[in-house]
Image (cartoon, helix red, strand yellow):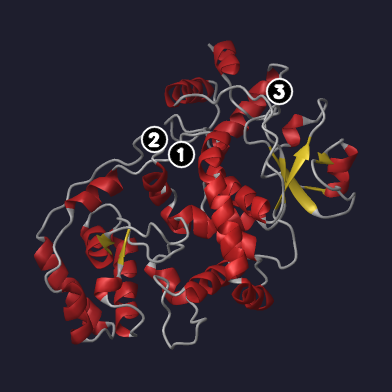
Amino acid sequence: MRVRAIAAALLMTGLSAAPAFAACNNTGSFDRWLSSFKQEAVAQGISPATIASALDGVTLDQSVIKADRGQAVFAQSFLQFSDRMVAKYRLDKGAQLIKKYKATFDRIQQKYGVPAPVIVAFWGLETDFGANLGDKQTLRSLATLAYDCRRPDKFRVELMDALQLVQRGDLSPAQMRGPWAGELGQTQFLASNYLKYGVDFDGDGHINLISSVPDVLASTANYLDALGWQANQPWLQEVRVPADMPWEQADLATTHPRAQWVKWGVKATKGSLPADGMAASLILPMGKNGPAFLGYPNFRVYLEWNESLVYSLTAAYFATRLAGAPTLTRGDAPPSLSLAQGKQLQQKLAAMGYDVGKIDGIIGAGTRGAVQKVQAKLGLPADGYPTAELLARLR
């Protein structure tokens, strides 16, 4: 979740992927490193008893290092991923949970402004509503990552914060189990966010994001509120777009008042689209022939939670379904490029002088921006969606 990019979602969903990180070499003894870290923890106010209960006997977990070095990014299209994740059983279960915890959700929305469908969608995507929390020892995972040469500074902080959770009595070391990257709880908080945004909403004197549903839901809302969630405002709306749209305007970096989108012929698929001043971006995850959405300022919060457009759009769409929206209109978009084709496209674009970032086959914002410019030069609809046809033209 959030700062962990997409790794845990990949493990949960089994997405095809490409290696993303180069290896570095560890030197020095893990045991000596751990002894030094314990001394640092004492200097930062962690009690010797807490340190002993949490870290005595902890060993290096090579499987965590292997997982971290093998992290990858989404290679599925929006429709492939959303079809899998916004499944009927998740929609049914989500609706049941909204009803079951209605009083709790009402209190949460009154305090934080975040509606139940938004929280429940994250709950469902992150851990299947608490069913799949992960089974690795969190403190061992964090110690391994804090020792490892790739991102030690980041995970030293997370390990120290995890010790703070133990010291203040929120969780015991035995309770702290999760995925390899050290997240905790039913919406997968890193220890630092657990400390900052965790809420004792059941009033028992502890913040337990493992087994207290009220704490889980309120803490999730508190974090979304901190990211900038605007109460009583929309986040995503499916729309229909006309054939003569100025396609180059379909970009997350481009916003217009809804009145302008209406003027261009954009219409809501359900209900109305007011011709007012509310800012919105047109999102075409699979180009002009696929699904189309208006993303409102609250959608930016989704991208803060997880920077992947595929994940964020799926989470936001899931929430709209829980809020009563119908199944999206699929359209007839051409298949997305394979990783090999994406890499070929990026190589062609880079050779033409475009900055596409890392040439890895993953179609990110830089590649989409370059695709838009090339499409415009070639006289094609500049919707930013790379296709096999475009690749063939560039060849």
Q: Residue 381, how many percent across, how many down?
A: 72, 23
Question: What residue is disc 1 on?
Answer: 74
Q: Secondary structure at mark 3?
A: helix
Separation (CA) of disc 3 from disc 1: 27 Å
Q: Residue 69, how many percent across, how many down?
A: 28, 45
Disc 3 marks which amino acid? Ala
Q: Residue at x 70, y 26 (%)?
A: 289
Work out whether 369 lies above or below 301. Answer: above
Question: What residue is disc 3 on?
Answer: 376
Disc 1 marks which amino acid? Phe
Q: Residue at x 71, y 68 (%)?
A: 231
Nearer to us of marks 3 and 1 is 1
Work out whether 214 lies above or below 313. Answer: below
Judge by depth and name the residue closer to the eye, 126 or 224. 126
- 3 and 1 marks in contact (CB < 8 Å): no
Dot 2 crowding, Cα within 10 Å, few <14, some 14–19, many 20+: some
Any part of residue 124 in sight: yes
Q: Residue at x 30, y 55 (%)?
A: 180
Q: Residue 198, how many percent across, how many down?
A: 47, 75
Q: Is residue 97 left or right of residue 143?
A: right
Work out whether 302 lies above or below 55. Answer: above
- 1 and 2 marks in contact (CB < 8 Å): yes
Q: Secondary structure at mark 1?
A: loop
Q: How many marks?
A: 3
Disc 2 marks which amino acid? Ala
Q: Secondary structure at mark 2?
A: loop
Residue 17, label in figure: 2
Separation (CA) of disc 2 from disc 3: 30 Å
Dot 3 crowding, Cα within 10 Å, few <14, some 14–19, many 20+: some
Nearer to us of marks 2 and 3 is 2
Residue 394, label in figure: none
Q: Residue at x 79, y 41 (%)?
A: 269
